[in-house]
């Protein structure tokens, strides 16, 4: 019995070596047409469009602030995926921080708006808050200051959620040397 290993990036790379320029452009065109995710990736990678973050924000918003009247559910994993996808596409620290702060804003806003009591959701919010601070720590003062102001608003709302969310955010702000407006 012959067992075959699953194809890997090395296998794909070897096949790509056989492509000429028009063939490679055709392949990328097919990938572009195949999915909105691929389009968002290529737009971000090449800096195309007015707001390369918009499709990522739309997805984050859908999964963190679902339409409860349409019986939509939340999904932290599906809300985190666009951040990972953006990081792979371009990984611009300012854009990455913007998406992370947006994630926190939508998560705390939804929780506050509907009175969500979900410890796993809150844990993900606090983890993303810490990741945002870590990325922001390396940014220049101007964008960092604006993002920090938005995170401070998240922290203030976090104190209304219970489960120690606001306290955990206070601790993270202190860990990164920000006073959090306290």
Image: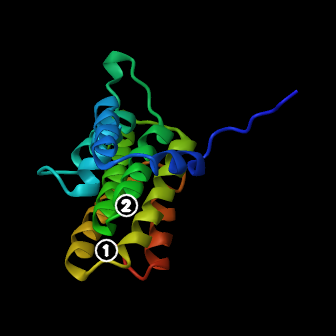
Image: 72 above or below 117? above
Query: How far across and down, in percent of the image, does residue 122 sit?
Result: 50, 48
In the picture, the disc for residue 155 is: 2
Is residue 111 positioned above or below 73 on the image? below
Q: Secondary structure at mark 2?
A: helix
Q: Is residue 106 visible?
A: yes
Q: Callout 2 environment at 10 Å: few (<14), some (14 to 19), or many (20+)?
A: many
Q: Earlier in the sequence, mark 1 or mark 2?
A: 2
- Residue 39 versus residue 71 in the image, above or below: below
Residue 146 falls in which quadrant of the image?
Answer: bottom left
Q: Nearer the viewer, residue 180 or 6?
A: 6
Which of these two is toward me, 39 or 67? 39
Q: Work out which residue is located at the far top of the displayed protein and give it.
A: 70
Q: Which residue does the numbered mark 1 point to in the structure image? A: 181
At horizontal 57% and vertical 43% (from top left) the residue drawn is: 120
Task: Residue at 51%, 43% (x, y): give it.
Answer: 121
Q: Secondary structure at mark 1?
A: loop
Residue drawn 22% across the image and 45% down it: 54
Regarding residue 61, the answer to whether it shows in the image is: no
Q: Is residue 99 left or right of residue 163?
A: left
Q: Position of residue 107 (x, y in %)?
A: 38, 45
Q: Pick the quarter of the image with the N terminus.
A: top right
* C-alpha distance separating marks 1 and 2: 10 Å
Marks 1 and 2 in Cβ contact (< 8 Å): yes
């Amino acid at each position: 019995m012959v067992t075959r290993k699953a194809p890997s990036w090395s296998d794909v790379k070897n096949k790509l070596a056989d492509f000429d320029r028009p063939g490679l452009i055709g392949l990328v065109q097919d990938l572009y047409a195949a999915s909105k995710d691929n389009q968002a990736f290529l737009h971000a990678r090449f800096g195309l469009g007015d707001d390369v973050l918009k499709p990522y924000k739309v997805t984050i918003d859908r999964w963190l602030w679902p339409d409860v009247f349409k019986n939509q559910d939340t999904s932290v994993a599906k809300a985190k995926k666009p951040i990972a996808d953006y990081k792979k596409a371009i990984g611009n620290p300012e854009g990455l921080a913007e998406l992370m702060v947006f994630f926190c804003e939508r998560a705390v806003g939804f929780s506050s708006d509907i009175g969500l009591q979900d410890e796993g959701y809150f844990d993900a919010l606090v983890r993303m808050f810490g990741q945002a601070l870590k990325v922001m720590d390396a940014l220049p003062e101007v964008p960092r200051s604006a993002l920090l102001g938005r995170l401070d608003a998240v922290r203030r709302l976090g104190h209304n959620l219970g489960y120690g969310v606001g306290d955990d955010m206070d601790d993270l702000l202190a860990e990164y040397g920000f006073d959090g407006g306290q």
